[in-house]
Amino acid sequence: MKLQKVGIPDVKPEEQFIINCLRSEFSGGYNHSLARAGRPGIRWDAVFETALNWNIAPMLYRLIKNWPDLLNASGIPDDVFKSLEAAYVKTYMVNRGNFSELVEVIKSLTAADIQVLLLKGAHLAQFVYQDIGVRWMADIDILIRKEDLEKANGLLVKMGYEYPDMAPLVWDDFGERKQVRDQAAVLDWYRTYHMHLIYCNPKAIQSLEVHWGIARTASPFSIDTEGLWERARTEELNGATVWVLSPEDLLLHISLHDSLSPPEPVRPEALL
């Protein structure tokens, strides 16, 4: 009986090169077969484009930079290597600014007896990869206890943060803005059915997600949030004490986050 692969696409040489780099990095170090993987016929522009699409261009830069033999033997063009370097530098600079502002948020909340736990990229970049330049982040995610939401909201508003989703949605014929939402009702909906609120400060962190849970009410999974806190541990972040998930909870959260989320419940029309 002949077995056939079903539904498994062929891996392109450029993709295989990146996979080999990651596999070597996380399984013990440089493998000399990587240099040979770059020849013949690999499209280095496609390597860069794939790394961008996979959001790992900064990480790939650091891996290649740390392995001079690979850089010398694989034939990576200088312009491609410089493009990877630029992706790393950009990520590092953006993250450095965000983490600097995050420390101020943590200190302000901690001073008010609000514990702060880092989620996803904010945890990984600092304490797993230990290089904020390799982990691209679309936003900063933190977890607080639900009973601390009101107090945290007041502190964040004083620091210049606001809800981008609460902005007026339309303008009248004379250029005047109209408030078309009942802000209190919308916030109540989020707290009932969702798991976080998004804050924005154009002069600080432009997307700060303040979580009180890691799964929505409609999720098929029951998450013991208090259990996450009980298993969490503390770390130091530039002089501020912060909490992070246990390794087991971190892996489960990342898996949950990357899985398909159920659709949100329909919002009542009265909220709009």
Image (spheres, helix red, strand yellow):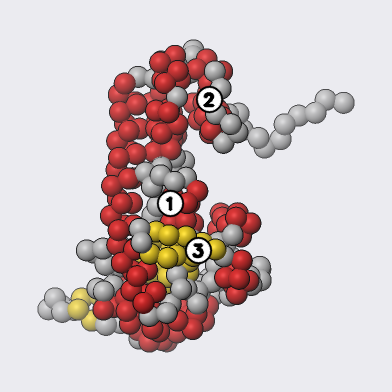
Q: Where does the image place residue 207, in percent across and percent down from the top left?
A: 34, 63
Q: Position of residue 154 (x, y in %)?
A: 33, 82
117 and 41: which one is in front?
Answer: 117
Q: Measuring from the top left, give residue 64's x and y in whole percent.
A: 43, 27
Inter-mark Cα distance, 1 to 3: 13 Å
Task: Select label 2 or label 3 by which is in front.
Answer: 3
Residue matched to label 2: 30
Residue at figure coordinates x 63%, y 56% from the top left: 248
Q: Quadrant of the N terminus?
A: top right
Q: Are marks 1 and 2 in contact (CB under 8 Å)?
A: no
**Based on the displayed image, in which of its 4 quarters is residue 229 positioned?**
bottom right
What crowding class fits label 2: few (fewer than 14 Cα within 10 Å), some (14-19), or many (20 or more)?
A: many
The kind of residue on which mark 3 rests is Thr
Where 50 falls versus 117 (above or below)?
Answer: above
Q: Is residue 172 above or below residue 232?
A: below
Residue at screen point 80% across, 28% down: 3
Q: Earlier in the sequence, mark 2 or mark 3?
A: 2
Image position of 5 with respect to 142: above or below: above
Mark count: 3
Find disc 3 in the rendering and name its residue.
234
SS label for mark 2: loop
Residue type at mark 1: give it: Gln
Q: What amino acid type should be assigned to the residue bearing mark 2?
A: Tyr
Label 1 or label 2, whichever comes before in sequence order: 2
Say which residue label 1 marks.
126
Q: Report the disc number at residue 34.
A: none
Left/right placement of residue 46 relative to residue 16 reads: left
What's the distance in space between the residues labelled 2 and 3, CA to CA?
32 Å
Q: Are marks 1 and 3 in contact (CB under 8 Å)?
A: no
Where disc 1 sits, the SS reads: helix
Q: Residue at x 55, y 29 (%)?
A: 29
